[in-house]
Amino acid sequence: MAQEDGSGFFKGRGAQVNTQNKFLKNKYVADHIEGIDEPLLENSSTQLFEETPKKIVSESNSPDLSHMYSLNPYQGCEHGCIYCYARNSHEYYGFSAGLDFERKIIIKRNAPELLEQYFNKKNYKPVCIMLSGNTDCYQPVERKLQITRQLLEVFLQYKNPVSIITKNNVILRDLDILTELAAMNLVHVNISITSLNEQLRQKLEPRTITATGRLAVVQKLSENGIPVRVMAAPIIPGLNSNEVPNIIKAAADRGALAAGFTIVRLNGSIAEIFSDWIYKAFPDKAEKVLNMIRECHDGQLNDSDFGRRMSGGGKVAESIHQMFRMACNRFMAGREMPEYDYSLFVPKKGKQISMF
């Protein structure tokens, strides 16, 4: 259960509020608090909700993410990263993008079955599918449910390429499958490291493992021949932007082959959630950070312009780009992720194919 630390900041969760869901007309409020004998409390424990979708693989037609195929076994994420762009998607389920996103997790137990159906479509041609394009496929509940492990078993069975992005060391549980996939050039792993500062990490990403723990994951995967890219994302100007070279060096020292980054953008409800959070978590830095984010997005906290929304624009963004390029040239020169092998795909695995 989240606890208030005396300053009005609740530890253990990222968001400090539940924003209004724009799709809902009604909400619970305490307008006349003096007339309530007891405080209006909400359940702060994590709750699981089951969904049985009819399809599981999504294709993005965005110019920034052209032809990116992704699969999300979970919606919502207990990691509680305050900046997470996926928060807005929780509103489609009737929940808030704030605290609800972190404590009301939607699970899709039939995801492995649906993935197999996808691979067995008549005209399917192998493409790389990302786990996950929205929320972390190795978030805490995966330790028990093992939906992601079952999905990896399907990828291995059909020999279809898969890209994974996570910030959780639960991925090491699946080292056996990942090693087999890597031996056939069928997997890339992206480890997200936003900060090496543990005090910042605790408030920015309250239920994730430490940066030290993530670097250990990078090293363990690399030692087992699994190609790893570090994602220094998102970069928040004035908060973690100065850490870019140190993150890339630390990852390179542990075997990472490549690096990537994005600049934070605060679309939809995330602008309210992030602004509320930073005034509570870092009141002295709040105005400066928010103004620098605006500088990167044409004066706005949100940004939907293709080409700029993820990479930013203006002088602040350009300085971050330059720092990133210099760090990669210095610490990762000559390294690259291996190409996927699409020729190994095995259609209709385990099914008898007619000779006529």
Image (cartoon, helix red, strand yellow):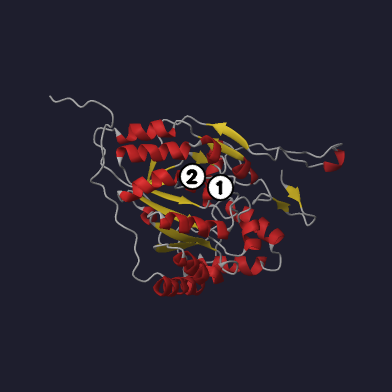
Residue 60: x %, y % from top left? 38, 47
Residue for badge 1: 87
Type of residue at label 2?
Arg
Residue picked out by circle 2 = 173
Q: Quadrant of the C terminus?
A: top left
Element type at mark 1: helix
Residue found 42% across the figure and 57% down from its top? 223
Q: Gap in Å between the C-alphas at discs 2 and 1?
A: 27 Å
Q: Residues within 10 Å of mark 2 (few under 14, many from 20)?
A: few
Most distant residue in the left direction: 356
Viewer-nearest residue: 276 or 232: 232
- Judge left or right: residue 145 versus residue 126: right
In the image, residue 76 sits, relative to residue 220, either above or below, namely above
Residue 329 visible from this viewpoint: yes
Give the percent coordinates (x, y) of residue 16.
68, 51
**Foreground of the two, 125 or 100:** 125
Q: Position of residue 250 (x, y in %)?
A: 50, 67
Q: Is residue 13 above or below residue 113?
A: below
Q: Is residue 21 visible?
A: no
Circle on res. 253: none
Residue for point 72% across, 46% down: 2
Under circle 2, the secondary element is helix
Q: Residue at x 38, y 48 (%)?
A: 179
Query: Closer to the camera, 186 or 282?
Result: 186
What amino acid type is highlighted by mark number 1?
Arg
Q: Position of residue 159 (x, y in %)?
A: 30, 41
Where 183 falls versus 245 (above or below)? above
Position of the N terminus, as image quadrant, is top right
Q: Is residue 156 left or right of residue 104?
A: left
